[in-house]
Amino acid sequence: MTTILIIDDERPIRSSLRDILEYEDYKVLDVDNGFDGLNILKKEKIDLVLCDIKMNKMDGMEVLTEAQGICDTPFIMISGHGNIETAVEAARKGAFDFLEKPLDLNRLLITVRNALEKGVLVKETKVLKKKVSKTKEILGESPTISLIKETIERVAPTEARVLITGENGSGKELVAHWLHEKSARASAPLIEVNCAAIPSELIESELFGHEKGSFTSAVKQRIGKFEQASGGTLFLDEIGDMSLSAQAKVLRALQENKITRVGGEKEIDVNVRVIAATNKDLLKEIEDGNFRMDLYHRLSVILIHVPSLKERAADIPIIASSFCEEICGGYNTPTKEITEGAMRALQSLPWTGNIRELRNMIERLIILSDKKITEREVGLYANPSNNNITAANNTSSKTGQILDFDKFESFQDFKDYAEKEFINFKLDKNGWNVSKTADDIGIQRSHLYHKIEKFGLKRTE
């Protein structure tokens, strides 16, 4: 129900407004001073405020100004001593409208309706902006995350190359996005290449492009990622998986700012800032002969290490609450409360899949829990050491809430469900490294790609 707050020091005015608005099926709260009104705005969800200007203790304009820092609730200012100057000042300070006493009933109701519609539009706009935003916020207040944010602010405006290290799912890609967003190249493209997902025989063509006829399937000329990113940023994710021959060409491109397409002879100038990321220890890879030392030094002008989620467990409540709000908004349902006990339980888990795993777990908890996410739900649904099927087998007879077998019309439907959940879990656990996942579960990589396409599985951050 829509809630309207009335702030006015005249009881007859408050009573009249309450009668009118309650008759229109609005929930009404009223106070006789600005201090109490501001306290209500801090504690409760208010959709609209009707505020008198001339009041004892605290002037209505002061209330309006203070409220701007608390919420986005629209204000309608009312006064028995109004003039054009007062109306202009109220509008300048952010009021939706200004009404003079005695209030005209029709104008009051029309203004209230318009203000409420504006409030809904403002909220919807914020939700849509979050959905279409290219770059999500880096969540957390731990010392390591604060240092990363500070480093981004300092490094992003420069042309320095950055090497980002950290476990799968820890947020390396997000750091790369912010380095681009805060750079002078933000208006140009950010081109991403996952070196682990591209077969070694195709990586050079992917990066540098190829000429028509340069190899059997090269039926036309192809522009590579270096050219596509010219003027912008090239993000080489999982660079530790790049072949040595491709590493040599990348090194030349970084040294000379020139590339040559596969099968071509012409040198092409490129203006690219390279940001690289890896979950491997590149110094160890150098010792083992799998990575070039000269390329490492070219890439690592600035080193940023993203800690695992377990290393910054203090940030889990902030991240979990944000995911909960985002996911519930996507489902168009009220945001579920995560209790303190549930938060502590989440903080105690190992989180081998880091941020990506946490987001998936929060989505699972939202779907399977009731109005609140409690410690019990975390124990049942979000323990990374168990998948949904195992939990269902162990506890469905006691709770009857985890897995509804009636929803499966055939044994094949259940097998598809179990297979999808199992593959999704393994992919998340391995940070969507398809090769590693295929080895872990004992199938060919091409077969796994087919399963991913069949079940519509997608990598989430």
Image: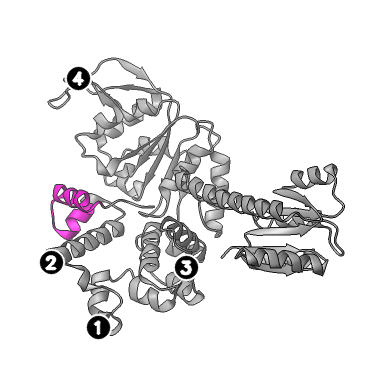
How far apart are the alpha carbons under marks 2 and 4? Answer: 50 Å
Residue 336: which disc?
3
Which residue in the structure is indicated by mark 1?
Answer: 397
Q: Which mark is first along the chain, 2 or 3?
A: 3
Mark 4 burial class by Cα count in 10 Å: few <14, some 14-19, many 20+: some
Q: Is residue 231 magenta?
A: no
Which residue in the structure is indicated by mark 4?
Answer: 212
Looking at the picture, how far across and down is residue 351, in whole percent? 37, 65
At horizontal 56% and vertical 54% (from top left) the residue drawn is 146
How far apart are the alpha carbons under marks 1 and 4? Answer: 62 Å
How far apart are the alpha carbons under marks 3 and 4? Answer: 55 Å
Which amino acid is tagged 4? Lys
Which amino acid is tagged 2? Ser
Which amino acid is tagged 1? Ser
At horizontal 25% and vertical 73% (from top left) the residue drawn is 404
- Of residues 99 and 294, the one nearer the viewer is 99
